[in-house]
Amino acid sequence: MKKRIGSYPRVRIEGGGRGVVSQAGAVLLVETVRKAGLEQVISAALAPWRRPRAVHDPGKILLDVALAVAMGGDCLADVGTLRAEPGVFGPVASDPTVSRLVGALAAAGPKALSAIRAARAEARERVWKLAGTAAPDAAGQVIVDLDGVLVLAHSEKQDATATWKKTFGHHPLMGFVDHGSSGSGEPVAGLLRPGNAGSNTAADHITTAQLALAQLPKKYRRGRQTLIRTDSGGGTHEFVAWLAQRGRWLSYSVGMTITEQIHQAVLKVPAPAWTAAIEPGGEIRDGAWVAEITGDCLKGWPKGMRLIVRKERPHPGAQLRITDADGLRLTCFATNATGMPIAALELRHRQRARAEDRIRAARATGLRNLPLHDTTQNQIWLEIVQLALDLLAWMPMLALTGETRRWEPRRRHLRFARHWPWTDVITNALARLEALPNPG
C-alpha cells in the first residue's frame, strides 16, 4: 500500500501476485471515486450532518455503503465487507454509526436528498468530460429513459401496498441515461412510490423527468439535444405537454396506448404508406412495417407531435390483443422529432428496451428489496443504490474498452488467482484510471 489520498488508501496493483486480498476488484471503483472527485463533493454536501468530534465523515460513510452495494450488498450491514479490508477501503464506520447517519439524513428529508443529488450531478459532469468520446453526450445528444420498476416487500414496510401485478411492495419510477449499444447506462432519477402508484401518473413522470434533468450538465437541461423516452406509461396529455412546453423544448419519444381511434386510423392506412422497419445495422426487420398517422388522432395534443405506428408479426405463441389488426401486433409512439426517416425514429424508440437492462442491473445492485421500514429511509437507500450504479457505469466509461464496457453487475463473489484470464483487463483499467487527472 502506498500513501493515502483522501479517505481511501492508494493501493498498488500487481498482476499474478501471491499476496491477495478479497474484494480486490473494488479497487477499480475506489479509483473511480477518486477520479470523479466524488469523495470531496459528497463530503462537502453532507458536512451539515457531521456531528461535533465525529471520527467518520458522513460522505465517506455514504460512499462506503454505496461501494458495498456495488459489490453485491443489499443492506446497510453489508458495509462490513469493506471493514474487513482496511488496506483497500481505509477506516469504515461501525454498523450503528452507519444506521445513525441514514436516520439523520432521512429525518432531514428533501434537504438531504438535494445535497446528495447535487453532489452526484457535479461528479457526473466531471466524469463525462474525462470520458471524452466515450461519454454519453459525445454525439451531441443525451437520451434519458424513464421506466417503472416493481420492488417486492417481504415484510410490512411503510407505503408497501398491492401492485398492479398482484404482488406486494413499492413501485419506484427510475430514469437512466442511455450509453448506447457500446456501453451500459447510468441512473439519473429515482422517485420512490407506493406499490399501487399508477403507471400513467403524469405528475410522477414530470417529477422524475425534473430529477433526471437536474442530474445532467446544465446545457442539457432544456433543448432538443435532450431526448426523453418512455413506454406507454408516459403517453399522457399532461406529460407530453410538459415536455413540449415553450422554453423547455425537449425532444421526446413516448409510447402511446392503441386506442380505438388509433386502431381505426391504422386500418385506413394504404399499403404503399407502410415502410419496412429496420434493424440497428440498417438491414430490413423481417415482418415489421411502420407508418405515420395523421388527422383527428392528433387533436388535443401539442403542436408538432407525430404519431408513428409499427405493425409486426407476433412471436410464435404470442396472444393477439383486441387492438391488433390482420394478425399483426400494433405498437405506437409519439415524437416531436423531424429530419429523420420514420423507420429510424421507430428504431430509436425501440431501443428504449435497453432500460430493461438498466433495471436488471439495478436489481442486482441493491434494488431487489428496500431493506428499511420508513419511506424516508428507503428513499436514502434508493440514492445509495444510484450512487453504486453511478460507479458501476462510470468505471467502464473511463477505464474499460470494447465488450468489457457492457459488462453488468452480478450477485457473485469472485476470487482472483494468478491464472485468472481477466487479470490484465483489471490492471489495464486501473492504469487508465491512474492516467486521468485528479480533481483540482
Image (cartoon, rainbow, N blue to C red):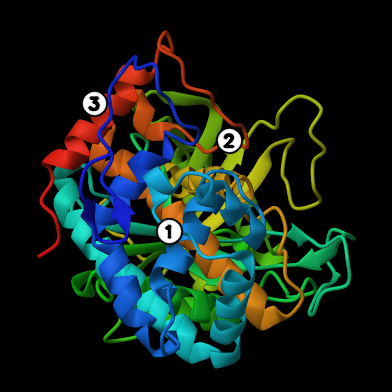
Marks 3/2 in contact by CB < 8 Å: the verdict is no
Q: Is residue 241 visible?
A: yes
Measured as percent of width and height from the top left, residue 416 is found at 47, 21
Give the structural element (helix, strand or loop) at label 1.
Answer: loop
Q: CA distance from mark 2 to mark 1?
A: 26 Å
Q: Looking at the image, is mark 2 or mark 1 nearer the viewer?
A: 1
Q: On residue 410, which mark appears?
A: 2
Q: Looking at the image, is mark 3 or mark 2 nearer the viewer?
A: 3
Instruction: List the single residue furthest toward the top.
Output: 419
Q: Nearer the viewer, residue 261 or 343?
A: 343
Return the disc, 2 or 1, that comes first in the chain's sequence. 1
Give the structural element (helix, strand or loop) at label 2.
Answer: loop
Relative height, residue 416 to residue 150 (above, below): above
State which quadrant residue 413 falls in.
top right
Disc 3 residue type (three-letter): Asn
Disc 2 residue type (three-letter): Arg
Return the disc, 3 or 2, that comes first in the chain's sequence. 2
State the residue at coordinates (69%, 64%).
259
State the residue at coordinates (54%, 42%).
357
Disc 1 residue type (three-letter): Pro
Instruction: Give the residue pinned by disc 3.
Output: 428
Q: Is residue 348 left or right of residue 139?
A: right
Relative height, residue 355 to residue 126 (above, below): above
Return the disc, 1 or 3, that comes first in the chain's sequence. 1
Measured as percent of width and height from the top left, residue 398 is found at 24, 42
State which quadrant residue 133 falls in.
top left
Q: Is residue 36 left or right of residue 366?
A: left
Neighbours of disc 3 within 10 Å: few (<14), some (14-19), many (20+) = some
Which part of the image, by quadrant, shows the N terminus? top left
Q: Looking at the image, is mark 1 or mark 3 nearer the viewer?
A: 1
